[in-house]
Amino acid sequence: PRGQAPRGLVAFWRTHPVYMLLAALVALATLNVRLAPLRVSPAAMMAGRGFGRAANPGGTGQPKKKPSKPSSKRRGRAPPRQKIGSLEAKLLQEHAASCAAAEATFAVCASDGDGEYAAGWTAHPVPAGAVSETLYSADQPLLLESEGPLLSESECGALTNAMLLHGAAGGWDSRYPLAGYTREVKVSDMPAALEMLNGALRSTLLPAAASAFGLDASHLRVNEALVVQYDAASGHNALPIHRDFSLLTMNVALSPSDSYAGGGTWFEHSGETLVCERGGALLHAGGLPHCGVPVTRGVRHLLVLFLLAAPLPLLAGRLQAIGAAAGTKPQFFSQPRRRPADLALSSAALQLAIEANPRDAESYSQLGHNFASEDRHADAQRCFEAAVELSRGRDFAALVSLAEAQAAQRQHAAALVSLQAALELAPPPGPSAADERRAVRRRGGRRGGGGEEGA
């Protein structure tokens, strides 16, 4: 996930030593997590008791729902918890360490306040239940577009120039090891830009984000801040579909919209691409799947802030990161499954991630790939069906993976239906979209000659 993305498994373990201990704890957890065939539907899983949440004494296993508070009220108070185990305690310690590291680098608001931004936000529709219900109130808009600039022309220009100078002198940063994806620089690596950003965080950016999501501005922490470049001429012009490791992600446009063609942020739930004017911002729940649309002319620069909230730990996200690092799912759709570092560890962590957030389609998908690598195709099918259901049929990769699991069980007619649904949906916009579409067509051709279902 963006905001915590490892650059490969070895680098992940080196840069996140605490996960070595977490790995051992999750391995112990496998004694209590059965890796038997999944026999529950996504709806049944959603009705189960969540990881680290108090059970409802009424008998349904769901946490009690409190009445929704008006959006003007501040959120951010941690929910009551049962007695926690060693794994959850370690995850909470890791969250606290992340917040402390963020506070040591980036500005923190001393108190809750409205800040200097007063132009307001336009909400874009997001289906109910698209992300974890424990982190956001039921009536909270999850995708917002600013109605005015949050950064001035001079601030946008200064951040862009700082990135260009840093990249020319010290090279670019890139967390996606394939051609066609963006260049970026960490703001923390550019002292003058960091000083300027910290002033904007205190005065405008953090108060605006907190107010939009009903949070206390003093609780927000910048887990990471990047200046990202989409450059048509170099071919580094897009970002693949992904979810962010953040409670909130803020994308602030640093380039005038007439300085490039194409571009924008595409969201899976709607297929909508949003483009902001210079200084304007998109603010969204980190778990919403999205991608950076290819820029076909010119250069587009963005400031991207990955925000955490001190009282709201992302337990499911941390478990999913462990599962992803140790599992088999490739980083890109076009790649074959990779050799897992620790399949049992990965599957245990992903099942715990699903327990923590039953709406996490990505954990279901990761777990499905693990099962498929063991030829447990019925289990893989159930996982991919869950991912498709949770995405409301809009997860292209999950539809294709579902077809593969169905075909492996000689359910050829069902596999053709899944592939047709993927083709009608089309892959997310990106440099490999045309190749992905052709690959699915070829698979559909082969399935069409495979005989009737059950043959």
Image (tube, rainbow, N blue to C red):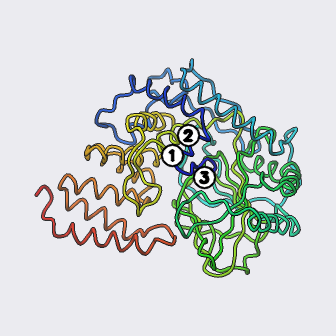
Closer to the N terminus: mark 2 or mark 3? 3
Whole-percent x, y for residue 244 in the image: 60, 51
Q: Amino acid at mark 2?
A: Trp
Check contact, mark 1 vs mark 3: CB within 8 A: no
Rounded to the nearest angstrom, the CA distance separating label 2 from label 1 is 6 Å
Q: Is residue 313 left or right of residue 455?
A: right
Disc assigned to residue 13: 2
**As displayed, is residue 353 above or below residue 232?**
above
Residue 209 percent location from the top left of the image:
76, 50
Work out which quarter of the rendered image holds the C terminus and state it: bottom left
Distance, label 1 to label 3, CA atoms, is 15 Å
Tell me residue 430's x, y (percent). 52, 70
Residue drawn at the location 54% of the way across and 68% of the way down: 179
* Numbered disc 3: secondary structure: loop
Please, which residue is most extreme toward the top here?
Answer: 83
| The one of 317 and 8 positioned closer to us in this rendering | 8
> Which residue is rendered at x = 34% and y = 56% of the image?
401
Labels 2, 3: front one: 2
Name the front one of labels 1 and 3.
Answer: 1
Q: Specify the farthest residue to the left.
A: 455
The picture quadrant where one finds residue 167 is bottom right
Task: Decide which of 216, 70 is in the foreground and name it.
Answer: 216
Any mark on residue 2, and which?
3
Q: Is residue 120 left or right of residue 36?
A: right
Q: How many marks?
A: 3
Residue that carries the numbered disc 1 in the rendered image: 9
Disc 3 packing (10 Å; few <14; some 14–19; many ≥20): some
Q: CA distance from mark 2 to mark 3?
A: 17 Å
User: Mark 2 touching mark 1, by CB under 8 A?
Assistant: yes
Kind of residue at disc 1: Leu
